[in-house]
């Protein structure tokens, strides 16, 4: 039997903060799947060259872990048994045009899974993630949202693009034009949360592997909400400064050194994050109206619930009966 080229057969391509890590972990438990040992190599964000010199808080530190050399990327799949599907997951592939182009050109047989989430909920969760980690300097979500273009112009990495990451209609229209919609499985975050067994079986059917083998997805790694205040401001500045300095050492060393700062930042904080006010959400969702219409047309599916002034919240708030989102 001929040896296969060491490249992925299936990629989870987006979106960030929409359950991609949970789906990757679940699929990695399937005996017919070989998941790359590095969950987010980000290879197709590059072009066989070092990552762009992004300069948002923590970006230089994060970029040390990007895998951009072709031989290093192929090595991720070298141990895959001959009869398994090789899986890679990088949730920014769906977002960036040059990544979509590379996927289409370099992986002509691969299949793609996109997990999408109510775009305002996704953006709020994205901001919350960076705020709780001490990297987001802006304590107000809407202010950070409005600063997006200025941050992009200043060279901040894609994870800071709260609003634009949620324009799935544009992204999926471009990708489907390149690879064909039949090679793309689009899931909703709420399906992973509320109907994991049904959703995982749907994924397995799409991939042509055995169903009823995996039935659960792990809960997200939630952290306490961090209230704005003097302590938060001081510790946040220390974390951002340390992350910049940490770009000069191995990432694992910085993560270990930063643990006391993270514990101090999150100590005594409320477990539940605040909900986004309906009037704020109603204003922000209007910026997605055209893209939601495009998405509905492309997939022939209604996303009317995303137009609501009430979001669906975090993973823990969604567990139980099927919710919107």
Image (cartoon, grey):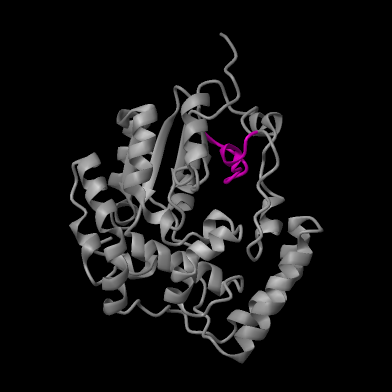
In the picture, which quadrant includes the N terminus? Answer: top right
Q: Residue at x 53, y 61 (%)?
A: 160
The reply, left or right, for residue 55 in relation to residue 2 is right
Q: Position of residue 152 (x, y in %)?
A: 54, 59
Give the main secondary structure, helix, strand or loop, of the magenta stretch. Answer: loop
Q: Is residue 103 magenta?
A: no
Pick out the residue farthest to the bottom: 230
Q: What residue lies at 36% left-to-right and 52% top-to-bottom?
A: 167
Please give the count of numbered marks on the rendered protein: 0
190 or 110, which lies in front? 110
Q: With 168 as the anchor, is 268 left or right in this view?
A: right
Left or right of 308 in this view: 226: right
Query: How far across and how far down the image is residue 320, in percent?
Result: 27, 65
Residue 139: give x, y in percent of width and height. Answer: 51, 80
Identify the residue shown where x is 64% and y is 78%.
236
In this rendering, position of residue 264 left or right of residue 35? right
Residue 286 appears in view: yes
Look at the image and tell me in which quarter the C terminus lies.
bottom left
Which residue sits furthest top? 1
**157, 42: nearer the viewer:** 157
Which stretch is magenta? 34-47
Establish if 76 lies above or below 200: above
Residue displayed at 30% across by 57% down: 190
| Residue 32 at least partly seen | no
Q: Position of residue 268 (x, y in %)?
A: 56, 87
Observer-nearest of 246 and 218: 246
* In the depicted structure, whether residue 84 falls above or below residue 100: above
């Amino acid at each position: 039997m001929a040896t296969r080229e060491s490249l992925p057969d299936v990629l989870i391509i987006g979106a960030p903060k929409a359950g991609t890590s949970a789906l990757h972990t679940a699929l990695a438990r399937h005996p017919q799947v070989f998941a790359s040992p590095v969950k987010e190599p980000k290879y197709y964000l590059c072009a066989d060259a070092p990552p762009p010199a992004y300069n948002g808080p923590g970006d230089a530190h994060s970029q040390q872990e990007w895998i951009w050399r072709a031989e290093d990327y192929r090595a991720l799949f070298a141990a895959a048994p001959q009869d398994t599907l090789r899986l890679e997951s990088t949730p920014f592939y769906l977002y960036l045009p040059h990544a979509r182009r590379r996927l289409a050109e370099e992986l002509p047989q691969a299949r793609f899974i996109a997990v999408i989430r109510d775009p305002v909920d996704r953006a709020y969760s994205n901001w919350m993630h960076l705020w709780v980690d001490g990297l987001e300097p802006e304590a107000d979500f809407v202010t950070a949202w409005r600063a997006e273009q200025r941050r992009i112009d200043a060279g901040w990495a894609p994870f800071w693009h709260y609003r634009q990451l949620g324009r799935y209609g544009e992204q999926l229209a471009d990708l489907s034009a390149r690879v064909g919609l039949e090679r793309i499985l689009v899931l909703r975050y709420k399906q992973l949360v509320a109907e994991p067994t049904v959703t995982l079986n749907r994924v397995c059917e799409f991939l042509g592997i055995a169903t009823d083998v995996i039935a659960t997805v792990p809960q997200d790694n939630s952290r306490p909400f961090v209230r704005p205040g003097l302590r938060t401001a001081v510790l946040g500045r220390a974390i951002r400064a340390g992350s910049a300095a940490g770009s000069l050492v191995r990432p694992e060393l910085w993560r270990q050194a930063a643990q006391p700062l993270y514990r101090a930042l999150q100590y005594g904080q409320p477990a539940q994050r605040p909900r986004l006010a309906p009037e704020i959400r109603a204003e922000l969702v209007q910026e997605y109206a055209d893209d939601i219409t495009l998405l509905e047309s492309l997939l022939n599916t209604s996303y009317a619930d995303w137009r609501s002034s009430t979001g669906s919240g975090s993973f823990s708030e969604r567990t139980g009966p099927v919710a919107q989102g």
